[in-house]
Image (cartoon, rainbow, N blue to C red):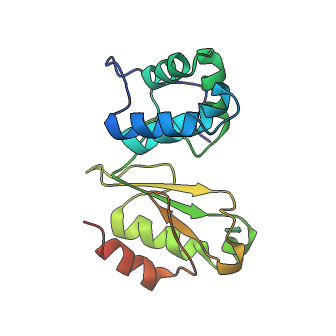
Amino acid sequence: MSDRSQLIETGKPFKFDAERDAEFERLVKRYPTRESMILPALWLTQEQEGWVSAEAIAYIADRIGTYAAKVFEAATFYTMYHLKPMGQYHICVCRTLSCWLREKQNIIDFLAEEIGVRPGEISDDGRFSLEEVECLGHCGTAPVVQVNGEFHEEMNVEKMKTLLAGLE
Ligand code: FES
């Protein structure tokens, strides 16, 4: 398992783009306290950058008006937040029981062969990264794959082939 206690510095300041900035302001009105915005703000960051850097953690803390340590704690605790750059297409394959029983391994093996990445790796061209994750909450339609957060259910190798072919 990778070390999730290390943040990467980019050396460049981070801030939300106009779209995320507006979304942050819209959401902050709906939450009881500004600190409740830590998870949504991390999510907005990841949507914008694909991952969460040390500068982003500092920005979020400042924007919310809390300690960077609290934002860091949340970012490092929840594995859905990426603490390093990922591929243009980040593929998550569920490895928990239902998906395991319904042969998620065939999908993993196919991806290793087809795009040359194993779980935890990024392809040489930076297009794909692959991660095995715990239950994605759609066990009834296992095996489940996510690509950049979008769910694909009842997957198999053939469907994965079609899905990859459709990615630009
Ligand atoms: S076990 Fe895979 S989605 Fe729940």
Quadrant of residue 22 within the rendered picture: top left
Is there any visible trace of residue 85 in the rendered image?
Answer: no
Quadrant of residue 32 within the rendered picture: top right
Q: Vertically, is 33 above or below 150? A: above
Q: Residue at x 71, y 73 (%)?
A: 139
Q: Residue at x 69, y 28 (%)?
A: 33
Is there any visible trace of residue 86 in the rendered image?
Answer: yes
Q: Position of residue 45 (x, y in %)?
A: 45, 36
Q: Quadrant of ligand 1?
A: bottom right
Pick the front one: 68 or 21: 21
Pick the front one: 69 or 85: 69
Q: Residue at x 50, y 49 (%)?
A: 120
Q: Vertically, is 8 above or below 142? A: above
Q: Vertically, is 118 above or below 140? A: above
Could you tell whether 3 is left or right of 24 in the image? right
What residue occupies the far bottom of the structure in this picture?
A: 158
Q: Position of residue 49 (x, y in %)?
A: 37, 39
Q: Residue at x 51, y 16 (%)?
A: 62
Which quadrant: the N terminus? top right
Pick the front one: 132 or 30: 30
Q: Position of residue 73 (x, y in %)?
A: 66, 26
What residue occupies the far front of the structure in this picture?
A: 29
What residue occupies the far right of the structure in this picture?
A: 97
Which quadrant: the C terminus? bottom left
Q: Position of residue 10 (x, y in %)?
A: 35, 22
Q: Count the labels in the image.
A: 0
